[in-house]
Amino acid sequence: MIDPVLLRENPDVIKLSQRARGASESLVDEALHADSVRREAITEYETLRAEQNAFGKTVAQAAPEQKKALVAEAQDLAARVREANQRVSEAETAFTTLVRGIDNPVIEGVPSGGEENFVTLREYGEHPDFDFVPRDHLELGELLGAIDMPRGTKVSGSRFYFLRGIGARLEIALMNLGLDRALEAGFIPLITPTLVKPEVMDGTGFLGEHASEVYRLRDDDLYLTGTSEVALAGYHSDEILDLADGPLRYAGWSTCYRKEAGSYGKDTRGIIRVHQFNKLEMFVYTTPDQAEAEHDRLVAWQEGMLQDLGLSYRVIDVAAGDLGSSAARKFDIEAWIPTQGAYRELTSTSNCTTFQSRRLGTRFRAEGGKTTPVATLNGTLATTRWLVALLETHQRADGSVVVPDALRPYLGGRELMTPEN
């Protein structure tokens, strides 16, 4: 949720953000009007409450013969107070509904526009140059006995798969490498729940425009998470955090579930866009003034992983219209996929400023003892999709795949993955 004070004092800033996102600017005016109505209702209620309290003392001190008439007045005043309180409740609901529909104001410098309007910040590494026709990740995975899509489809339907043999080991190795890097950077590891309550899912902003991608268990009123970011954001909901010694950093390991609604016909081959995958997610609670610096640190840790895995990639500044409601800025890292001749997203790292913490009630105690919303950030440190880039980048003509040096200790020193037959 956006800062109501910012809405009241600098509505043009929010309108500018809405314009950059391609979202409704009139919603800002509607929210401003609703805020005015809400504040008027609160003032009226408080005035009547003060009058009621004062009148109560008058009744208590009145002579017995006067009390009967005064009690009738008191009852009338009590009814007016109840009516005023109801108007406050209705005004609060109307305001909250409107203001929760406004996306997080983007940070200055975020490019305007939609998915295609990103800005490339930097590129790293040379694209692989093969003297043979490269195989795609699924053909390689089948040769290695690492990926079994037909049986995944047989058991669970389209966009499901089995990782088997070296494929299962490779993913676990990748996740463990990420976990070790997270521990070195001071992250606390957590294995998170993958089912969360509606208020937690909504608090992170995933029940807005991305609601169609979320699996829901209606009988239990729970949601399957598409990232451990959701559970990690809820971990400290309704708490006051101590950030005196710096940010709180968590690394959440979980299985993730996404419907991939609206993506039919896209990336249907292989494991690029699937319904279930594993992910190690970085999540940070910090003070708002440190959020942008922390954002850069998260990206640096991601780049360190990708460089040590020998992948060619680019870092992009995602355009405002492609951010999602909770992110004020997002940096994606996209790896080069040889058989597609294109970069494909491997990581997303978002600075959500205080948007999620306002919805979830997560605060810290600032100087002077005042509590204020924390800033939250999240970013991928390892996930199943990375296997696509690893297999295709490090393949050889005979279908074998070289294991990057950084992963070898996690695979018993293995240097090469070879076809089963």
Image (spheres, rainbow, N blue to C red):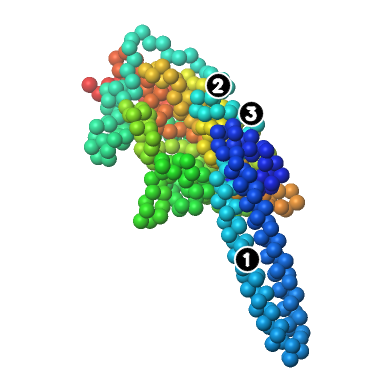
Q: Residue at x 59, y 48 (%)?
A: 99
Q: Position of residue 3 (x, y in %)?
A: 64, 46
Q: Is residue 5 above or below residue 278?
A: below
- Residue 421 lies, with reference to residue 209, above or below; the image says above
Numbered label attached to residue 109: 3
N-terminal label among 2 and 1: 1
Q: Position of residue 384 (x, y in %)?
A: 40, 32
Are circles 2 and 1 on residues that touch, CB within 8 Å?
no
Label located before the other in sequence (3 or 2):
3
Residue pointed to by mark 2: 120
Which residue type carries mark 1? Asn
Residue 413 visible, this angle: no
Q: Quadrant of residue 103?
A: top right
- The residue that label 1 is drawn on is 85
Q: Secondary structure at mark 2?
A: strand
Q: Is residue 389 visible?
A: yes
Disc 1 crowd, CA 10 A, few/some/many (<14, 14-19, 20+):
some
Label 3 packing within 10 angstroms: few (<14), some (14-19), many (20+): few
Q: Secondary structure at mark 3?
A: loop
**Residue at the image point whose x is 36% and y is 34% from the top:** 274
Q: Looking at the image, which residue is at 37% across and 18% down?
A: 339
Q: Secondary structure at mark 1?
A: helix
Q: Quadrant of the C terminus?
A: top left
Viewed as shown, does residue 99 lie left or right of 153? right
Q: Nearer the viewer, mark 1 or mark 3?
A: 1
* Residue type for callout 2: Thr
Q: CA distance from mark 2 to mark 1?
A: 53 Å
